[in-house]
Image (cartoon, coloured by chain):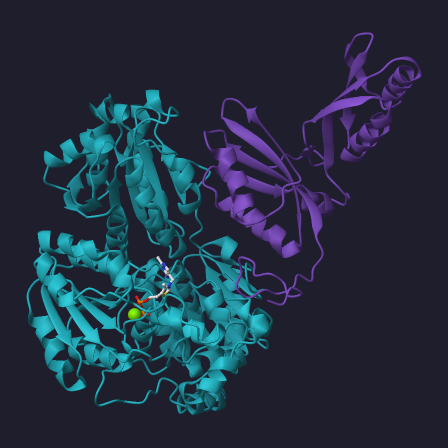
């Protein structure tokens, strides 16, 4: 077999992807029922779509509605497919591409935030430096003893990434992140 | 009390879960189900025993139940229903569920589950059925409380049959079948608001499509299974549209019969084993109207060379089908029937100069003159194409339903049997499931007791679900299994000849059973025929013999199926039979193409 050729993929007639990938944040409103997350995730794994981040929680308790925020990437035609395929899932009420909504309103992006808990251990200079940086990043200390801190830090993904990178040489032990939550700017909700 | 399907619906009342299942079947108009018992569905079987409204057909393997329900559904336009037990019963249902998903067949599968209290403990015959079937159903449910059960059942029928039809599964733990709760009839059942399939299309897109078509000089209609799914009226409207526009029309494998094969503008099937004229028309057209089809890879051939000069209109009920494979210029989301109705009306309201089509129709006639389905007749051995032609001639004046297995015989059936009506042709298109045809035929026969039902089979495929002949015997369902016996997995061999240096790895059907004796062992009639001169009499005998018949038709072993678009090639690069010399065949698929199949 000629190794230089593309290996066979799921499609039989492989055409080279010419469009470049874009990153998108999707907001998906679903009935909060057993299996709904498995349906969404199964769609992404089964059809070979990317998930960069996924968050989910019930947001309207009376109506049992959850909002799933998915950050994905792909060429535009794949992104369109992802949206339509999500809409086919029976418990899905609505799928909104927040990036497209933002563009249509003249903004460049939706509002996106992530929260991270960052555990750092150390003493002396390094410990002081870690605390000082936490303040500079507007983080808060939520647990500490003489050997460690747990910082809570919120912000855009890039800010979280940056903070974690800075903590690495200062005694970073572990990190837990929520993934991205997002809303579009302006007065309207996703159902409008 | 509301009326549904001419039957009085029960009002809200107390009953057991098992009773609810049967009541919901009745209230949703079900008269026949296909199933197989086991520990986790015994309460439901007990209820089935105590009533006569729903007929239960006992199969021999749950896969058979699923394909029977599919054949039943496809031939009637109604929903098919299967009933299986937990664990192995449910896992055996996976193949027909995926088959129905790929071909958009409405199918409700009811599965028993171990009692709620032991779910998750690896109990005897436990299986995460909703987990296993999630990707191969349109939707599925694990019922957690008896009071949900009736509404879930009604919702199951609604979701299976509306929008783009498909399979659904309801998993019912045994304790819920025993528990007593409130039965809610369909008319009072709540419907989930998140599921709202499209029906009516936007008028402006239809108008835009009609404008394009009115100015087209080289139009072609490419129709698919969606037209059949939409109902008889859609096929009538499609015929009317062809008649008023004079547009040539081709169809996918799934769409055969929507437009009659004897129709003046019929081009034959398109795609990998489609006709030269259909594929050339697709390649050269200036406007393509795709209605109820989905640009499957067996249809398009090489994508970057697919119909390069055309504006494309795509009518589909499923928005995710639009722009999935091929970019279209005018997407129309809606039920084919409704859209065709609008198109016919709009077309009639304007005018078009039919003479503008003359050069295009002449071009098509010249392609037709290539006679792409020609084969070399033989006096000594039965050519498989000839067998289908004779079968067609001897059955065309009856109400005949044809099912198939998967392989060369399936493609020859599609090429050489002339389908005049929708819902008469049942084949596994999307999944390509060997073993589909025999049980599908049994399901068709259950729905149409007076019709002639023939499974055009292959010697290998038929062995996959052979045991369902026993079901046919038990219920006196006179299916005719017409085996084109070439002693090979012919389609596999054809690809090995094209792609793998003629190394016929494991594609020879060694140790074939004696099909005549096998028929007799089941209590059916066996017929053997190996001579072209005997064929007509033998087929007549098959038709006239009451009860199930297995017809062992020995055909030319090494015949191959042409025309063919080799993998990785475009529509205008097809291999025609007269060009299919050994040399051309061996060079047909280059190294790059070989990776793609
Ligand atoms: C369940 C299943 N397994 C394997 C295949 C791959 N396959 C496609 S056609 C074919 C051979 C079919 O042989 P036969 O039924 O004799 O038909 P013929 O091509 O000879 O007409 C095989 C193995 C399939 N389609 N389905
Ligand atoms: Mg064979």
Question: Residue at (35%, 50%) from the top-left corner?
Answer: B95
In front of the other: A164 or B201: A164
Quadrant the N terminus of chain B occupies? top left
Where residue B289 appears, x then y in whole percent?
48, 70
Question: Residue at (31%, 45%) from the top-left corner?
Answer: B93
Where residue B119 appears, x then y in whole percent?
36, 25
In front of the other: B544 or B398: B544
In front of the other: A148 or A72: A148
Asked where in the image residue B43 lies, by quadrant, the reply is top left
Judge from the rendering whether residue A23 lies leftward or rightward of residue B220; answer left or right. right
* The chain coloured cyan in the image: B
Question: Residue at (88%, 15%) from the top-left corner?
Answer: A127
In front of the other: B2 or B259: B259
Residue B410 in the image: above or below residue A136 = below
Q: Assign ligand 1 to one image quadrant.
A: bottom left
Judge from the rendering whether residue B141 lies leftward or rightward of residue B49; answer left or right. right
Question: Residue at (48%, 86%) from the top-left corner?
Answer: B583
Residue B397 in the image: above or below residue B578 = above
Residue B158 in the image: above or below residue B410 = above
Residue B356 in the image: above or below residue B445 = below
Looking at the image, how many numbered discs can be counted on the residues? 0
Where residue B82 appears, x then y in whole percent?
25, 44
Asked where in the image residue B502 lies, by quadrant, the reply is bottom left
Where residue A168 appears, x then y in whole percent?
83, 27
Q: Color of chain A here?
A: purple
Judge from the rendering whether residue B19 lies leftward or rightward of residue A186; answer left or right. left
User: Is any part of residue B481 visible from this angle?
Assistant: yes
User: Is any part of residue B75 visible from this angle?
Assistant: no
């Amino acid at each position: 077999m000629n190794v230089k050729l593309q290996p066979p993929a799921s499609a039989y007639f492989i055409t080279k992807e010419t469009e470049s990938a874009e990153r998108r944040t999707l907001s998906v409103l679903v009935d909060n029922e057993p299996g709904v997350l498995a349906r969404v995730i199964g769609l992404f794994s089964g059809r070979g779509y990317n998930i960069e981040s996924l968050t989910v929680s019930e947001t309207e308790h009376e109506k049992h509605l959850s909002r799933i925020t998915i950050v994905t990437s792909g060429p535009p035609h794949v992104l369109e497919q992802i949206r339509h395929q999500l809409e086919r899932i029976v418990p899905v009420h609505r799928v909104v591409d927040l990036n497209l909504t933002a563009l249509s309103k003249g903004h460049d992006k939706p509002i996106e935030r992530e929260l991270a808990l960052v555990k750092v251990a150390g003493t002396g200079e390094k410990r002081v430096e870690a605390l000082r940086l936490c303040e500079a990043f507007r983080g808060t200390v939520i647990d500490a003893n003489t050997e460690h801190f747990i910082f809570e830090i919120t912000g855009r993904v890039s800010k979280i990434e940056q903070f974690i990178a800075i903590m690495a040489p200062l005694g970073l032990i572990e990190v837990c992140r929520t993934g991205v939550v997002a809303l579009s700017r302006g007065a309207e909700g996703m159902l409008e | 009390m509301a009326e549904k399907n001419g039957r009085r619906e029960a009002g809200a009342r107390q009953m057991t879960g098992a009773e609810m299942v049967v009541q919901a079947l009745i209230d949703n108009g079900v008269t026949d189900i296909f199933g197989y018992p086991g520990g986790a569905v015994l309460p439901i079987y007990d209820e089935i025993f105590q009533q006569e409204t729903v007929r239960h057909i006992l199969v021999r393997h749950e896969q058979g139940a699923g394909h029977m329900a599919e054949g039943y559904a496809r031939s009637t336009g109604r929903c098919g229903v299967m009933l299986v037990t937990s664990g192995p019963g449910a896992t055996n249902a996976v193949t027909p569920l995926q088959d129905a998903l790929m071909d958009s067949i409405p199918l409700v599968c009811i599965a028993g589950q171990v009692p709620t209290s032991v779910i998750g403990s690896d109990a005897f015959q436990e299986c995460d059925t909703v987990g296993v079937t999630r990707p191969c159903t349109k939707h599925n449910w694990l019922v957690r409380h008896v009071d949900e059960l009736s509404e879930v059942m009604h919702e199951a029928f609604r979701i299976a049959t509306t929008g783009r039809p498909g399979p659904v599964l309801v998993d019912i733990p045994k304790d819920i079948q025993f528990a007593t709760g409130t039965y809610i009839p369909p008319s009072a059942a709540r419907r989930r608001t998140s599921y709202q399939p499209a029906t009516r299309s936007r008028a402006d897109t239809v108008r835009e499509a009609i404008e394009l078509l009115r100015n087209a000089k080289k139009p072609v209609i490419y129709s698919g299974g969606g037209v059949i799914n939409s109902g008889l009226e859609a096929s009538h409207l499609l015929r009317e549209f062809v008649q008023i526009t004079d547009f040539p029309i081709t169809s996918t494998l799934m769409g055969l019969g929507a437009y009659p094969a004897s129709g003046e503008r019929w081009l034959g099937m398109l795609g990998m084993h489609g006709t030269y004229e259909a594929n050339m028309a697709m390649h050269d057209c200036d406007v393509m109207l795709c209605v109820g089809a989905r640009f499957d890879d067996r249809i398009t051939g090489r994508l970057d060379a697919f119909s390069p000069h055309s504006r494309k209109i795509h009518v589909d009920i499923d928005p995710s089908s639009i722009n999935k494979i091929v970019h279209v210029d005018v997407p129309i989301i809606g039920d084919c029937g409704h859209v065709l109705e609008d198109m016919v009306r709009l077309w009639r309201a304007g005018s078009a100069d039919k003479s503008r089509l003359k050069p295009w129709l002449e071009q098509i006639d010249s392609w037709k003159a290539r006679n792409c389905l020609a084969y070399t007749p033989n006096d000594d051995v039965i050519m498989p194409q000839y067998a289908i032609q004779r079968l067609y001639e001897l059955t065309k004046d009856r109400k005949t339903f044809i099912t198939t297995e998967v392989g060369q015989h399936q493609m020859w059936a599609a090429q050489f049997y002339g389908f005049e009506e929708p819902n008469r042709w049942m084949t596994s298109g999307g999944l390509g499931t060997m073993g589909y045809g025999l049980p599908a035929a049994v399901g068709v026969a259950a729905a149409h007791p007076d019709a002639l039902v023939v499974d055009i089979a292959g010697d290998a495929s038929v062995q996959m679900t052979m045991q369902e002949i026993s079901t046919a015997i038990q219920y006196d369902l006179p299916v005719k299994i017409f085996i084109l016996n070439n002693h090979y997995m012919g389609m596999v061999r054809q690809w090995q000849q094209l792609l793998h240096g003629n190394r016929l790895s494991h594609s020879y059907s060694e140790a074939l059973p004696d099909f005549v004796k096998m028929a007799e062992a089941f209590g059916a009639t066996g017929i053997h025929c190996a001579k072209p001169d005997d064929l007509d009499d033998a087929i007549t005998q098959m038709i006239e013999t009451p009860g199930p018949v297995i017809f062992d038709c020995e055909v030319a072993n090494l015949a191959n199926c042409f025309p063919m678009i080799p993998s990785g090639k475009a529509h205008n690069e097809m291999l025609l039979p007269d060009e299919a010399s050994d040399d051309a065949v061996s060079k047909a698929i280059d190294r790059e193409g070989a990776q793609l199949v």
